[in-house]
Image (cartoon, rainbow, N blue to C red):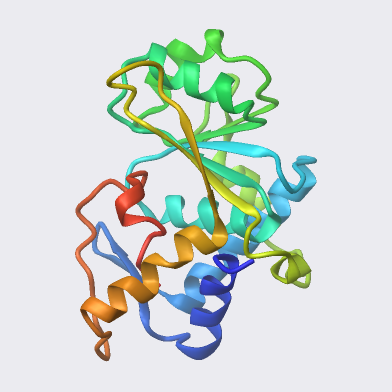
Amino acid sequence: MLLNLAMRRAAKLYPDNTATIFHHERRSCRNLMPGFMRWLLALIEMGLKPGDKAAIYILNSPHFLEVTYACFEAGIVIVPLNTRLAAEEPVFIINDAECSAFITDDILQPLASAFKPGIKGVRHYISVNGAGEFIDYEQTLAKFAGHRTELSEVANGSDEVLAGLFYTSGTTGMPKGVMLSHRNLWMNAPHTIAARPAEPKQVFLYAAPMFYLRHFPPSSM
């Protein structure tokens, strides 16, 4: 696989480069790794296995990056949800994709709680500042703060392994899940470089929603 290498490569070769700037908090590639690693451990501890699906219902933030790259490393298929959908639409997508985990943030959790009764098959509900039936995001990661582990060898798998299910808008019918492999998504990088070569210390203003396929995978690395 390919996408899971991006985080590791950035932390190894450019540890002090800026990875994210969010609400005036600047994090380097090195500083982004611990959250990514704890999420990887958390997903494995929850019993999620390669090929399982995880619905990501998160506004733009470093949390989106941590969860996404941990899924890539663990071989879990991401299902990014459009945060502007009406309540019944994410329910259809989550059920259609047969997601095992649902991860959201504190801003969207009230909406998620409202449509949660219609969801089937999800075993783990996680939220930033989670309450009720949602496990707290930071508490989940804190359990693994002192753990050390070698990154999995999932990277040796095929580039054609399914990386994500991206659902269409459904303008002429019900939304359909577009199956994209690691190689499919990775090709965005050389296409971008061909059009605009990378520059030292380059910083991107990420204004588009991170769930949006055209801008995927997140280019913060």
Q: Is residue 152 visible?
A: no
**As drawn, is 188 to the left or to the right of 131?**
left
Which residue is pictured at 60% across the width and 20% down the height? Answer: 133
- Pick whichever, 153 or 38, lies toward us: 153
Q: How many marks?
A: 0
- Pick whichever, 164 or 144, lies toward us: 164
- Pick whichever, 167 or 43, lies toward us: 167
Task: Point out residue 63 in the picture as x, y percentages from the top left corner.
Answer: 45, 51
Which residue is pictured at 37% across the width and 84% down the height? Answer: 17
**As drawn, is 165 to the left or to the right of 75?**
left
Q: Splitting the image into 4 quarters, where does residue 115 fall?
A: top left
- Pick whichever, 131 or 163, lies toward us: 163
**As drawn, is 70 to the left or to the right of 149?**
left
Q: Residue furthest top?
A: 117
Task: Point out residue 141 in the picture as x, y percentages from the top left corner.
Answer: 62, 51
Residue 171 sits above or below residue 107 on the image: above
Task: Point out residue 203 in the picture as x, y percentages from the top left corner.
Answer: 23, 76
Residue 34 sits above or below residue 213 on the image: below
In the picture, which quadrant includes the N terminus? bottom right
Q: Splitting the image into 4 quarters, where does residue 38 fall?
A: bottom right
Which residue is pictured at 49% across the width and 23% down the height? Answer: 93
Task: Point out residue 128 in the picture as x, y percentages from the top left corner.
Answer: 47, 39
**As drawn, is 83 to the left or to the right of 142?**
left
Which residue is pictured at 63% across the width and 33% down the height? Answer: 101
Q: Splitting the image into 4 quarters, where does residue 151 fall?
A: bottom right
Q: Is residue 17 visible?
A: yes
Residue 52 sits above or below residue 120 on the image: below
Residue 208 sits above or below residue 37 on the image: above
In the picture, which quadrant includes the C terminus? bottom left
